[in-house]
Amino acid sequence: MNPLDNPRFGEEAAIPYRSNIQFSPYRVFPREEWAKLRADTPMTLVPRDLEQLSGLIEELSMVEVEQIYLPLSRLLNLHVAAAQELHAVTNRFLGRRDRTVPYILGIAGSVAVGKSTTARVLRALLARWPDHPRVDLITTDGFLYPNEELLRRGIMDRKGFPESFDTARLLNFLHQVKSGRENVEAPVYSHFHYDIVPGQAIVIDRPDILIVEGLNVLQPARLPKDGEAIPFVSDFFNFSIYIDADPAVIEDWYLTRFMRLRQTAFRDPAAYFHRYANLTPEEARNQALHIWRTINKKNLEENILPTRQRSRLILRKGADHRVEDVALRRI
């Protein structure tokens, strides 16, 4: 049985009646069945595009784009059109003439699972549809607190956990974008320096679609006892995707990426992780494993994986990075 078909699929709090539920909120499409949903959607990418879109350890193929991402871009195109029409109808009802607000797509998942690759591919494909040519992309890394603040709070070793993000700033940013405001600024994060870049910003100016990629974008807030409204980041999403894989597989991907960076970016003396470049292969692998198990795996198990069931669509990957099946929420 596919785990997505199991009513116990997902990391949920214990519910007394859950054992009696005989259905899954998702419909699962094996790869071959999902590929057929491409219909007549044209391929708008060429092989040289894939070189720029591929990740450090994930080399995209034309087959993957054709079978997985073209059907997904077709689905999203239909959703965007429906959202635009609903906005127009609502404006007619209210007697307003507001501009169309951006459609916001959230992409969640673990470190090293391939979120950035998926986000880049979808941005490239969605921008080639005629009805929404302006597609922007941001990562929530820019909304991490600066290292200085993380050190002051004593949570530098919990970077990437929910408490390490300036959530209020992220919520205000999304509110401004969703309100159709011009030239909304988002902070810039440097993986090379492992910190926020002072004085730099990404400007989002009323795109047709905004893709928001991050670890904890589906994380719910704690409900207040007084019933006052507390917005979630996902409240601003029109659609959400969770990139999924077995944790042991993600661990292997993380180690592979770490070892590759050790031979490339880490060699620059200005890099934050330059100290790892001179370790022996065995020392480097042990260090990577320690970081994964004490930080990234812990964050995955405690905060990221439990949000999987909150997504509208789940892309389940195998050890070769290929998407094996797609789960689409039906309720």
Image (cartoon, rainbow, N blue to C red):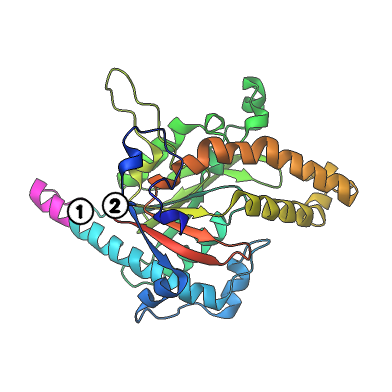
Measured as percent of width and height from the top left, residue 321 is found at 60, 64
Q: Furthest-top residue in view?
A: 226
Locate residue 17 relative to residue 291 in the image: left or right. left
Callout 2 amino acid: Val
Callout 1 amino acid: His
Q: Which mark is residue 46?
A: none
Measured as percent of width and height from the top left, residue 297 is found at 63, 41
Disc nearer the start of the sequence (2/1): 1
**Which residue is at 36% across, 72% downward?**
129
Provide the major secondary structure of the magenta segment.
Answer: helix
* Residue behind mark 1: 87
Q: Is residue 26 above or below residue 216?
A: below
Identify which residue, 60 or 182, lies in the foreground. 60
Write down the quadrant of residue 100 in the picture: bottom left
Q: CA distance from mark 2 to mark 1?
A: 8 Å
Tell me if residue 89 is in the magenta stretch.
yes
**Which residue is at 75% across, 43% downward?**
289
Measured as percent of width and height from the top left, residue 11 is found at 46, 40
Identify which residue, 168 or 177, lies in the foreground. 168
* Residue behind mark 2: 101
Q: Is residue 97 above or below residue 62?
A: above
**Crowd class of label 2 (few under 14; some 14 to 19; many from 20; radius 10 Å):** some
Which span is picked out in magenta? Answer: 88-98
Locate residue 295 relative to residue 90 in the image: left or right. right
Write down the quadrant of residue 292 in the picture: top right
Measured as percent of width and height from the top left, residue 329 is found at 33, 55
